[in-house]
Every structure is written in C-alpha cells, then in structure tokens.
Image (cartoon, rainbow, N blue to C red):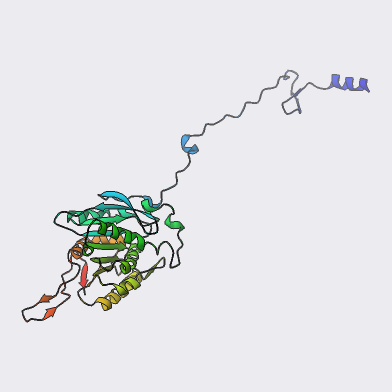
Amino acid sequence: MKKFILIVLLTAPPAVFAQSGRPVVSSSPTAAAVTPVAPRPVVPSSPAASAVTPVAPRPDSVETGKIDGTNLNITTDDNWSINITVKDPTEDESKYVILLPDLGKNKSSYAKLAKSLGDYGIGYVAVDLRGHGKSAFPLHYSKFAKTGIDNQFNKMYKDANAAVNYLKNKGVKPQNIFILGSGLGANVAANSIVFNNDIGGAALISPTSNTRDVLSIPGVKVSKMPLLIAAAPDNKKLFLEASLIRNIAFLQQGTGRITFLTAYDKDGTDMIDAYLIPNIIAWVKVPAFPGVKEDGGGLITGAETPPANGVDNLPL
C-alpha cells in the first residue's frame, strides 16, 4: 500500500497549493510558482461621506429676525420658565404690547412689528410661549397633548399672565398694557382676558374658535376691554370664525369698542407685516373711539376712520 502511494506522488503532475488549500495545476512545467493575489485596495472614505448628516433645527428654535431689548426669563404660577425680550417705551410714551406668537413660531416672528412699535416709542414684551423657542424646557410643544381642557396649550394663558404681572410689578398701569397674539397666540390672548380684564386691550390676529382646544369665545364673551380682530377673506373658514368672534364681541360691548380689520390675503404675522402695522399702532394709541359731540348736541359713538394702506379698518 505504501508503494502504490509513492508511485502516485512521483507520477502526478506538479501542483502548487494556494492559500485556500486546494491544488492549482500549472499549465506548463515551468509555471511552478504561484502569482500572489493582490490585496483589494482600501479606498479611504471622504470626510463628507463619513460625517453624520446634521439634524435640521426645529422651526420654533430658529430666529427669523432680530428683536431689540433685554432678554430675560420670568416664571409662571405653574413654575414654567418663560423667555421674554423687553423694550421699554420712550419717555413720552407709557404703553407696552405683549406679543404672543403662533403655534410653531417664536418671538422673533414679531421682529418687524416690534421695530415699528419701537420707532413710535411704544414698548413691548415679546414672549416665547411654553414649549417654543427658548421656553422649550422641560418639554417641547410637539410632545404636548393636542386635546383636553388641561393640556399645556390651554395653560399658555399663564405665560401671558406672567408677562402682565411682570409689567404691573414694574409699575406699569393696567390700562397701558395690551396683549396681541396671532394664530394660536390670538386664542391664548383671548383666553387670558378672563384673568386680565383690567388691561388696555387685546388684539386677536387670525383667531379661531378652537386651536388645540384653546377656546377664544369664552374670553371674548366676558371681555370689558377694547378688542381688535383681524382676518383675511381668502381663508374662508378662518374669516368666518373671526367674523363670529367679532359679532360676539360687538354684542357684548357695543359700538366704539371693537375694531375689525380685513386684509387682502395672508394670516398671522405675515398679514401684520404686509398690511396691518399702521393700523395696530393707531389702535394701541387710541383703542376705543370716544363719543364725538356734534353741533346738534347728539352723541355719536363708533366714528369711522378711512382705510389705511389698502386695509379696511372697520371700527364698530
């Protein structure tokens, strides 16, 4: 048996064993050497390919404009830290406007209005509502419950209350404090009327009857302050709801106390920036129309003023 195996080994053609252990038969007697297999080249990855794609910042954390003033935090009665930017009025003015942004926006959305208020010597308190912007700790608004009378959206009136109390503690008279909100901020402003019925007025820009279960009508029904309400007819649903709110306010307060503005299009701060700034400033200066005594001795209230800048100004 050993002899047979020896014969096979001697008569077999030359073979070379590759790294895999399998025999490789050469095509000629001279091809006894094995050509080594070249290793696969390692292509270095580019920095761009290896870098992690950055996560886009949330829209409410991006500042879309510059608001001048002092940046500070105030605390609500439920211990939420609210970031505000405050600019005091000039010496010949004494009024402040509290600015409440729409859902998903921060106080920088009021940059253009804030600048105009400052140009006219009117002070302001621009607010990042809870869950938004620099007031997003400990919870972002995207995590808030969207329904329920006790959800965090419904507690935003506490943010407005904290801003009002901040100004009162500075010695500002209530009649010199105004609240202006757009979209969700408009509903929050209306909701806060119940607790701040002594202030100078509230402006509701593009309000709805219900946003995230924040209702506007209950506050409007008990309001004793002058109101400004604005909406554009291109959004029929929003315009009809704003008109309903206006009618309820008018039935509650009568003539001379409600100003209703309509613009061509847009809503919220876009409508403010495009059309309404002159009207808002005029309203802050004179929020209610005093009685005008004519030569005949009759008392007329609700005197109308002509439209400004293509906007229908319809005081009632």
Residue found at x 66% / y 23%: 36
Residue 194 sits in quarter: bottom left
Residue 117, percent from left and from top: 21, 56
Q: Nearer the viewer, residue 188 or 233?
A: 188
Residue 63, percent from left and from top: 33, 50
Query: Is there any visible trace of residue 273 in the rendered image?
Result: no
Is 173 on the left or on the right of 11, as rendered?
A: left
Residue 60, percent from left and from top: 37, 53
Above-or-below relation of 7 to 217: above
Residue found at x 80% / y 22%: 13
Residue 167, percent from left and from top: 26, 57
Is 55 on the left or on the right of 299, as rendered?
A: right
Above-or-below relation of 1 to 136: above
Q: Quick one: quadrant of the N terminus?
A: top right
Residue found at x 44% / y 44%: 54
Above-or-below relation of 22 to 310: above
Query: Is there any visible trace of residue 77 in the rendered image?
Result: yes
Label total for image: 0
Q: Nearer the viewer, residue 237 or 189?
A: 189
Q: Quick one: quadrant of the C terminus?
A: bottom left
Most extreme residue toward the right is 1
Q: Nearer the viewer, residue 188 or 230?
A: 188
Residue 212 sits in quarter: bottom left
